[in-house]
């Protein structure tokens, strides 16, 4: 006969366990919240460029990103601080073309933007430019809302608890414990925690997408915006998985296993529906890897609390539960580790990124915690399991304590992984760094489109399209590119361009030694006796 719920875990023990989990969450809060706000997409080019001084009001603005985005808010802040909402725009792959509905007055303006990237993460920023002559810049921009940031992180951790410990626990009770009741209360509590955290996380996603404070959580536009992101799919699938897990605990005995299995599959599907890996290429590989990784975590982590309580209370079926788990966990861990390695390689790309990026540093913390977890699991599997199955009382108690330590480490890993919500993976940073920077130089005598690939310091290639002042073809005899940065103490870089025959002028194997704002000048020889010189600032990114 199975042990009763009160025999397995009473209210005091449940409260103590939740207190320990809460303590771990607070301990790792600092690790999960990096100092700066980051998202996935990155601005790689703007027209006008940041800091540009224009002779006249532009007819349109342009923002180009490292991946396709959808606008959330586009505003123009005038020199007097008043704002103009920009509603007319067009999407062209990774570029937003924005119409300017009015003639801008002299002074410094701010083009403020907020977009949502493919992985469901919002990002915002601003570009300053001036008409005529610069003035005192108007106040624009966003301060990090730490209350919202903390709420998002807590909601993410609690959703992990619901999916991994709740739905995973329901699977363990149905398939491994053969309907033992040890840990059932904990599993139900974890699922209810996830059911509360999922919709709350969706609302917080909407607030973050709009850059709105917590006080606006009840506004319909917040929820509409959240549902429009890929995270809406994650929450929907997560709610279904949580519901299936709860039904597997409360439903008829014959339907528990299918419901629990469907719930476990739902955990993997929910994680694969959004997030950094969902936008990573090749998605035919990354999405299945996320699915397997999530389902594997739920299988392992979900079994820990019911198993530990069963062993601790020395229920008569504890040995069978332990035997089934120890037999199944090895292939699960193998799949889990393989999927994790594949995803890490795709996201990090180079070992140096483990220490040079916030994402990499969080991954290192997670790897240290995993080392402790695998060490405990190895000791449990190869040293304690056999005598515990045989009924050795002291070994069973020791095993129960070790499993409890595993649970705490698992929750700590949840806390660290939730911090990835605020950091772009090195893969995304590399994509942004490889993008070109482009400027349009417009004068009455001549015009040019200049593009430098990649747009960061180091070895680059420059291409130029030369035109007359009225957009007509300009048959130049010679073009020379001059890059200068007087504040760096570096002499101007002067390179003649070649014309390969495709209508452009090129400078290959060009070395730009330092990042920052450079002045790009084109010396265009239009006849034997006439040289037209046009120039504009260009921002070169750090590598």
Image: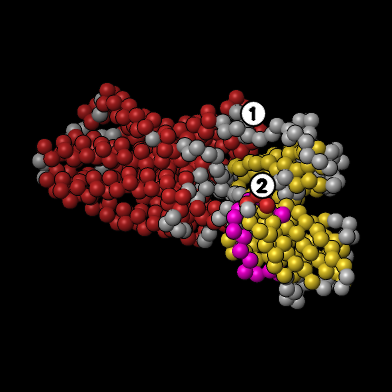
Helix, strand or loop at mark 1: loop
Is residue 516 shown left or right of residue 101?
Answer: left
Pointer 1 local density, CA inside 10 Å: few below 14, some 14–19, many at least 20: few
Whether residue 508 appears in magenta in the rendering, the answer is yes
Residue topped by disc 1: 219
> Which residue is outermost to the top?
12
* Front disc: 2 or 1: 2
Q: Is residue 209 above or below residue 91?
A: above
Instruction: Judge whether residue 355 is colored magenta.
Output: no
Residue at left offset 66%, top offset 59%: 491
- The answer to which image quadrant residue 26 occupies is top left
Left or right relative to 388: residue 136:
right
Q: CA distance from mark 2 to mark 1?
A: 21 Å
Q: With 165 as the anchor, is 397 left or right in this view?
A: left
Tell me the quadrant of the picture where the C terminus can be found: bottom right
The residue under the point 26% across, 42% down is: 177
Position above or below: 496 against 339: below
Magenta part of the chain: 506-519
Relative to residue 123, is residue 476 depicted above or below? below
Q: Which residue is pictured at 38% across the width and 35% down the height?
A: 28
Q: Position of residue 19 (x, y in %)?
A: 33, 27
- Specify whether residue 266 is in view: no
The overriding secondary structure of the stretch rendered in magenta is: strand
Circle 2 residue? 70
Res. 72 image quadrant: top right
Quadrant placement of the N terminus: top left
Q: Local crowd at mark 2 within 10 Å, few (<14), some, or many (≥20)?
A: some
Relative side of 508 to 21, left or right: right
Q: Is residue 528 above or below residue 285?
A: below
Residue 406, percent from left and from top: 28, 40
Secondary structure of the residue carrying numbered label 2: strand
């Amino acid at each position: 006969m199975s042990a009763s719920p009160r025999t397995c875990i009473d209210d005091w023990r449940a409260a103590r366990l939740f207190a320990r989990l809460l303590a771990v969450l607070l301990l790792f809060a600092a690790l999960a919240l990096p100092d700066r706000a980051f998202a996935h997409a990155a601005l790689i080019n703007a027209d006008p460029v940041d800091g540009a001084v224009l002779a006249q009001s532009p007819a349109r603005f342009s923002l180009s990103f490292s991946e396709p985005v959808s606008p959330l808010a586009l505003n123009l802040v005038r020199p007097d601080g008043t704002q103009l909402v920009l509603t007319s725009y067009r999407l062209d792959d990774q570029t937003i073309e924005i119409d300017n509905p009015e003639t801008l007055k002299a002074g410094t303006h701010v083009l403020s933007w907020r977009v949502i990237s493919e992985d469901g993460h919002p990002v915002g920023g601003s570009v300053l430019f001036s008409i005529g002559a610069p003035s005192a810049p108007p106040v624009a921009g966003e301060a990090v809302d730490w209350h919202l940031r903390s709420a998002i992180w807590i909601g993410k951790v609690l959703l992990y608890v619901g999916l991994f410990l709740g739905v995973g626990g329901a699977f363990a009770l149905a398939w491994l414990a053969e309907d033992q009741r040890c840990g059932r209360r904990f599993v139900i509590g974890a699922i209810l925690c996830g059911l509360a955290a999922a919709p709350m996380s969706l609302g917080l996603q909407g607030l973050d997408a709009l850059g709105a404070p917590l006080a606006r959580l009840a506004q319909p536009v917040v929820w509409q915006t959240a549902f429009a992101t890929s995270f809406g799919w994650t929450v929907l699938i997560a709610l279904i998985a949580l519901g299936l897990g709860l039904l597997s605990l409360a439903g008829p005995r014959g339907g528990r296993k299918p419901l629990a299995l469907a719930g476990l599959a739902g955990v993997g599907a929910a994680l694969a529906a959004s997030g950094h890996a969902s936008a990573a290429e090749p998605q035919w590989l990354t999405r299945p890897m996320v699915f397997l990784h999530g389902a594997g975590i739920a299988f392992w982590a979900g079994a820990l609390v019911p198993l530990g309580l069963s062993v601790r209370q020395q229920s008569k079926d504890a040995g069978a539960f332990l035997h089934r788990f120890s037999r199944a966990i090895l292939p699960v861990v193998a799949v889990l580790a393989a999927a994790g390695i594949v995803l890490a390689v795709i996201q990090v790309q180079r070992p140096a990124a483990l220490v040079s990026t916030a994402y990499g540093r969080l991954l290192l913390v997670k790897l240290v915690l995993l080392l402790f977890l695998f060490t405990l699991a190895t000791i449990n599997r190869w040293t304690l399991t056999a005598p515990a199955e045989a009924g050795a009382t002291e070994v069973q108690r020791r095993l129960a304590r070790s499993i409890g330590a595993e649970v705490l480490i698992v929750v700590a890993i949840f806390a660290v992984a939730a911090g990835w919500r605020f950091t772009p993976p090195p893969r995304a940073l590399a994509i942004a760094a490889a993008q070109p920077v482009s400027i349009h130089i417009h004068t009455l005598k001549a015009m040019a489109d200049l593009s430098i690939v990649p747009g960061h310091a180091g070895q680059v290639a420059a291409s130029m399209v030369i035109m007359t002042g009225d957009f007509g073809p300009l048959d130049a005899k010679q073009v020379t590119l001059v890059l200068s940065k007087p504040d760096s103490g570096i002499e101007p870089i002067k390179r003649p361009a070649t014309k390969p025959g495709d209508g452009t002028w090129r400078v290959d194997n060009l070395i730009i030694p330092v990042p920052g704002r450079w002045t790009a000048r084109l010396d265009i020889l239009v006849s034997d006796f006439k040289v037209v010189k046009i120039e504009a600032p260009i921002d070169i990114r750090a590598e």
